[in-house]
Amino acid sequence: MADEMKESMMGALENVIDPELGVDIVNLGLVYDAELLEDGIGKVTMTLTSIGCPMGPQIVANVKQELMELPEIKDVEVDIVWNPPWSRDNMSRYAKMALGVR
């Protein structure tokens, strides 16, 4: 069940597009973990492409909005971390192709 819920959460997070890059946060490799805690709280551990990312608040708001669509989730907690730092190596093949990154 936990694996199915994580898969559902990651699917919902694929709807969150980084406004600057035009690619979803999952394929960008920004999401490190997603889990449903016992009290119905969806917890997402993620990073941003840079510490001063001006789109950070919008991305976090979009994460909360998308996860609240799942019936099992009562509230959302987003934990922004900087370690490990994000790099292009985190991106999926799809994201690299979409952005023209090798």
Image: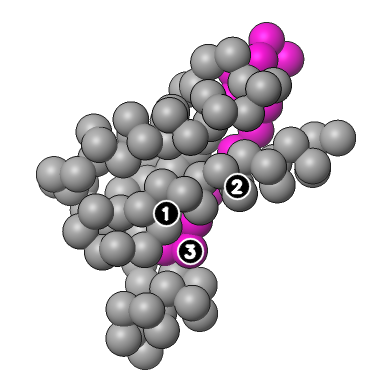
Q: Is residue 95 left or right of residue 42?
A: left
User: Where residue 11 sits in the image (x, y, percent)?
Assistant: 61, 49
Quadrant showing the N terminus? top right
Work out whether mark 1 precedes mark 2 in sequence or the reverse, and give the earlier one: 2
Contact, mark 3 vs mark 1 (Cβ under 8 Å): yes
Q: Does label 2 or label 3 sit earlier along the sequence? A: 2
Taking the spot 60% from the left edge, 47% from the top edge, the residue there is: 10
Residue 77 seen by the camera: yes
Q: Calculate the distance from the C-alpha at mark 3 to the C-alpha at mark 1.
A: 6 Å
Amino acid type of the residue tagged 3 in the rendering: Asn
Instruction: Please tell me the numbered disc located at residue 25.
Output: 1
Quadrant, the C terminus: bottom left
The boundaries of the magenta stretch are: 26-43
Give above or below for 40 relative to 58: above
Reply above or below: 98 against 79. Answer: below
Q: Residue at x 53, y 24 (%)?
A: 68
Q: Position of residue 92 (x, y in %)?
A: 50, 72
- Residue 31 vertical placement versus 76 (above, below): below
Q: Is residue 74 left or right of residue 93?
A: right
Q: Residue furthest top?
A: 39
Residue 29 within the magenta-colored segment of the rendering: yes
Answer few, some or many: residues within 10 Å of disc 3's Cα (few below 14, many 20 plus, some between 14 and 19). Answer: some
Q: What is the three-letter code of the residue carrying label 1?
A: Ile
Residue 100's x, y, as percent? 31, 86
- Evaluate if marks 1 and 2 touch, with contact meaning CB atoms under 8 Å apart: no
Q: Which mark is residue 10?
A: 2
Q: Tell which of 55 and 16 is nearer to you.
A: 16
Q: Residue at x 67, y 22 (%)?
A: 71
- According to the image, what is the colour scheme of the structure? one colour
> Pointer 3: what residue?
27
Local secondary structure at mark 1: loop
How far, Cα to Cα, is label 2 from label 3?
Answer: 10 Å
